[in-house]
Image (cartoon, rainbow, N blue to C red):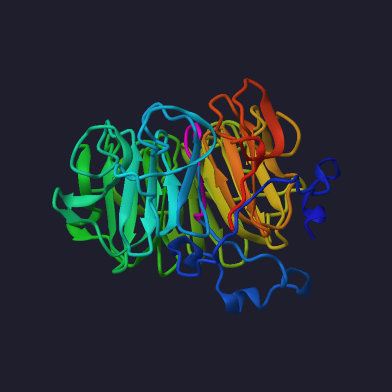
């Protein structure tokens, strides 16, 4: 089925390149996995997909030029650029291979379920429902009540003595952060230049603010996603809300007006996008995965990041991602995006990629932009993450792979270089595979 959706020139045979091994907990309680198809829906997939690896979302993240991964012991490891302390190791020294995120006391950050990364800041969600952040804080994106850079994790707080609690999902934008609480409300902090905090103002916030709509908290939300300056929320009813920057139509409300409060993503002026089970956002575009395995996209399409052909400019309302033969893409299990490229995890554990490929971030062996989904050189994948110019994957056997730009060492291959790596490569520590036992 997969080959039939792709033109013959893209019918590459997936090859898993040896990589670092990280034993992964199947975190069924992770918020973002709850937005993936439910077991009852998976049971209806074809027999050849029933034994495919189950996706575990949020155990890896890509930022502007850094990467994060959660190990099976709940610790967080980071590598790449560290100019703002975004690696969380107490210094500003970059690392070309994984290093453990540490508290200021010298103890490792642990108990983590999920990570997220902004342009130059990082976030970790723990099993206790607490949120820790570190890195750039120039806009208050760490949510600790200050605007100071933090080189070690700090706890997100409503006020300086009251921590944010009962959080089940989180996301990082370029310079802002989002969290969804167990009661379905959404909290945001950091840059608010385009209304991406969703509190009705344009004021930067150094502490969490509740996202509001018509004077009441946005409620019934189960997952969040963030672009550089816009925000998305997935409701339990399968509809999507958006706010913030809308220059390229990335809010999907059939307009290009910025919004300081949530608006519903619409197919048309009178019909909302629905049946959505997962959301993702790139720099100025958005994606939604529906219950039937299709992907819808809207916003900037300058390099084909919407995956629907050579549309110039932008799309203001959701349209389906299409294979090169024009047929809507189906069989998608999970999605992610960042910068100007998109990634999709298929039912069979393979990966499709589209959009900007000039730095090899699509993982199919070339440095070309692709305006339709193309097959990346991967299989048996359970988690995908996209950085601004690079991408990450975790395989079923725990292998972690990275590809794309490596100028700051964000691929974790033990070196930084100006070459673009268009195929997945292993992440190493001191030249040897990084093993979690």
Q: Is residue 346 left or right of residue 118?
A: right
**Where is residue 177 shown, x and y percent of the image?**
33, 45
Position of the C terminus by quadrant: bottom right
The residue under the point 78% across, 70% down is: 48
The image shows residue 63 at horizontal and vertical percentages of 47, 38
**Residue 319 seen in the current view:** no
Which stretch is magenta?
Answer: 58-67
**Residue 297, placed above or below residue 366:** below
Residue drawn where x is 24% and y is 57% of the image = 164
**Vertical placement of residue 199 versus 138, above or below:** below
Which image quarter is the N terminus in? bottom right
Q: In the visual, does 202 lie left or right of 289?
A: left
Left or right, 265 with reference to 143: right
| Residue 361 is covered by the magenta coloring | no
Furthest residue in direction top, as rendered: 418
Along the viewing direction, whichever of 235 and 54 lies nearer the viewer:
54
From the viewer's side, name the closer residue of 63 and 130. 130
Q: Nearer the viewer, residue 30 or 109?
A: 109
Q: Which sits in the foreground, 306 or 421?
A: 421
Q: How many marks?
A: 0
Question: Residue 56 appears at what percent x and percent y?
Answer: 56, 61
Q: Residue furthest right?
A: 8
Is residue 329 something that shows in the picture?
Answer: yes
In the image, taking residue 10 as reference, residue 228 lies left or right, namely: left
Residue 418 x, y percent position in the rendering: 62, 20
């Amino acid at each position: 089925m997969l080959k039939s959706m792709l033109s013959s020139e893209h019918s590459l045979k997936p090859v898993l390149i040896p990589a670092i091994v990280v034993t992964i907990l199947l975190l069924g309680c992770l918020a973002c996995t709850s937005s993936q198809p439910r077991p009852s829906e998976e049971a209806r997939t074809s027999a050849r997909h029933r034994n495919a690896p189950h996706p575990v979302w949020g155990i890896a993240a890509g930022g502007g030029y850094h990467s994060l991964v959660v190990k099976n012991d709940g610790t967080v490891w980071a590598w790449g650029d560290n100019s703002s302390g975004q690696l969380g190791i107490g210094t500003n020294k970059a690392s070309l291979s994984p290093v453990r995120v540490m508290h200021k006391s010298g103890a490792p950050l642990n108990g983590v379920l999920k990570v997220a990364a902004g342009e130059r800041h990082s976030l970790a969600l723990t099993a206790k429902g607490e949120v820790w952040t570190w890195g750039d804080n120039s806009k208050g994106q760490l949510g600790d009540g200050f605007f100071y850079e933090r080189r070690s994790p700090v706890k997100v707080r409503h006020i300086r003595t009251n921590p944010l609690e009962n959080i089940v999902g989180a996301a990082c934008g370029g310079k802002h952060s989002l969290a969804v609480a167990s009661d379905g409300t959404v909290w945001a902090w950091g840059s608010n230049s385009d209304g991406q905090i969703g509190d009705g103002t344009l004021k930067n916030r150094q502490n969490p603010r509740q996202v509001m709509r018509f004077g009441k908290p946005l409620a019934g939300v189960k997952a969040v996603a963030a672009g550089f300056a816009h925000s998305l929320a997935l409701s339990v009813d399968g509809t999507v809300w958006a706010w913030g920057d809308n220059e390229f139509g990335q809010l999907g409300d059939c307009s290009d007006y910025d919004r300081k409060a949530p608006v519903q993503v619409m197919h048309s002026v009178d019909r909302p996008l629905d049946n959505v089970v997962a959301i993702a956002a790139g720099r100025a575009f958005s994606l939604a995965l529906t219950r039937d395995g299709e992907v819808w996209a809207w916003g900037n399409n300058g390099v084909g990041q919407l995956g629907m052909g050579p549309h110039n400019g932008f799309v203001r309302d959701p349209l389906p991602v299409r294979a090169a033969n024009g047929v809507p893409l189906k069989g998608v299990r999970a999605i992610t995006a960042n910068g100007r490229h998109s990634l999709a995890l298929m039912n069979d554990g393979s990966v499709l990629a589209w959009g900007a490929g000039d730095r090899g971030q699509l993982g199919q062996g070339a440095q070309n932009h692709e305006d339709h989904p193309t097959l990346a050189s991967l299989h048996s994948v359970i988690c995908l993450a996209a950085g601004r110019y690079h991408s990450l994957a975790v395989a079923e056997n725990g292998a972690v792979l990275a590809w794309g730009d490596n100028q700051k060492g964000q691929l974790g291959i033990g070196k930084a270089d100006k070459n673009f790596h268009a195929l997945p490569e292993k992440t190493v520590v001191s030249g040897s595979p990084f093993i979690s036992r």
